[in-house]
Amino acid sequence: MSKTYRLLIGGEWVAGANGTVPIVNPADESVVGHAPEASVEQAAAAAAAARQAFPAWAATKPSERARLLHAAADALRGRRDDLIPLIIGETGATAAVGSRMQVPVAIGRLREYADMAGRNHDIPLPPNATPSTPLAAGGLIGGVVARQPAGTVATISPYNFPLVNQAGKVAPALAAGCTVVMKPAPQDPLAVLELAEVFDEVGFPPGVVNIITSAAPEPAAVLSTSRDIDMVSFTGSTAIGERIYASGASTMKRLLLELGGKGAAIVCDDADLKTAIGGIASVWGFHSGQICTAPTRAIVHESRVDELVGGLQAAAGKMQVGVPTDPKTVVGPVISAAQRDRIVGYVQTGADEGATVLVDGRDPGMDEGFYVGPTLLTDCRAGMTVVQEEIFGPVVSVLTFSDDDEAVALANGGDFGLYDYVFSGDSSRAYGIARQLRTGNVGINTAQRNPNTAFGGFKMSGIGRDGAVFGLHAYTELQSIVWPS
């Protein structure tokens, strides 16, 4: 709480022109620290600094970019013991999630893209025999599709995994030769400010990495309209993604948008219910449902619904709601009072529309903090609000189906398409269902992810792909170069 955080603009650490804002611990409502509040002018200055630094950074040897990213990973690891309690304090993540899924994963992403920075990602083409035309003489024409850095990038991250998400944006952007302006979510920006300190202390040139923080929307909006920003990489709600899409149109911003999700978990009549229940229960047990890939819609064959619902009800009863620092806690707080009230409102809407609140977590009995316990809604129908809209909390809605075609129709019957799941004892059947789903990702009999896959969504769940080498490619432009052989 005693540390003074500042903005990094063009290599200089400066106070927020609009003062500071308190960062509140969602577990007990105490103040974790104070974040600088940037002005619109400071946001514009950060974009200009990134623009000025871009040509030299783009021309920097890939081996040097790799060295600096590895150095940043080492420095971040050196801060691990201080960062973990900070992240738990500002995000409300449980001890298990905070210690295993936040700082270590961020370090891993810096190293992953440091290793990729030194590789040649150009695409060589075989010579093409071209006849003479009025345009030019014929001959063998060689060619290459080169990957050039996309330019200056605004990296705007969400509140659920602030450090991990920023590392997953900034590392591939820097590896590709881009410069960046980081803008973390206003609820929990402190660990990302620490990340900016790491980049500065290991020697990234001035202006290559900049950071602004603000609770007001106007400074972030500058980044989506400024001609000094070539690309916006944003993870967050679809509503904000729509605004970024629209405001960036006039300057033809390149976009990488990872937006909302409403994951469907199709449970077939031949599914292993223990596996399916474990996967669906991850909505409750993993960061209190504050994850866009969560299987929040259980679409269950009518012959197995009673078994599955009973298993989920039993699982919910075993998930302790409590303070994040208690090792026994499985479900911690959600990020804010506003988000808690939003989730509670959705549950009430579900009940008003005819759903049965079989497990009611709206009042888990905590004296302070922003808590919602595991909640299970049954007797749901396709058009209900709780089935169609992203709640971003520990709430599961259950629907039933009679055949595979109906299951696919229910899964595809919404605006989102980020991550769905299929549980079946017949892998061929499950694969066939997966190929019919309008979603960017499908897990078959698992809620685990493969880190080497392309990650992103269909429909209103976003544009573009990140993850592994696909993430590096997202921060590049394709440039075709040809010559006579």
Image: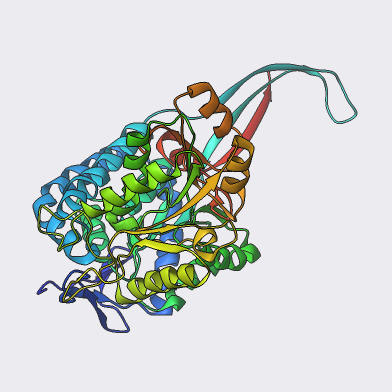
Residue at 27% over, 48% down: 315
Which corner quadrant of the image does residue 120 belong to?
top left
Left or right: 348, with 140 as reference point: left
Residue 128 higher or lower than 461, as above or below: above
Instruction: List x then y, in percent, for residue 474.
Output: 50, 43
**Closer to the camera in the image, 45 or 103:** 103
Residue 347 appears at what percent x and percent y? Answer: 41, 68
Q: Where in the figure is residue 99, as x and y percent of width and height?
A: 16, 49
Coloration of the structure image: rainbow
Q: Residue at x 56, y 57 (%)?
A: 381
User: Is residue 321 at all visible to an observer of this figure?
Assistant: yes
> Which is nearer the eye, 272 or 203?
272
Between 94 and 309, the one nearer to me in the picture: 309
On-image quarter of the C terminus:
top right
Q: Residue furthest right?
A: 134
Left or right of 385 on screen, residue 348? left
Identify the residue shown where x is 36% and y is 71%: 339
Q: Is residue 408 above or below residue 190?
A: above
Vertical side of 459 occupied by 37: above or below: below
> How many labels sit on residues?
0
Rendering quarter of residue 190? bottom left
- Residue 177 location (% of width, % of height): 42, 44
213 to the left or right of 241: left
Quadrant including the N terminus: bottom left
The residue that appears at 49% across and 34% down in the rendered structure is 268
Q: Can residue 204 be seen here?
A: no
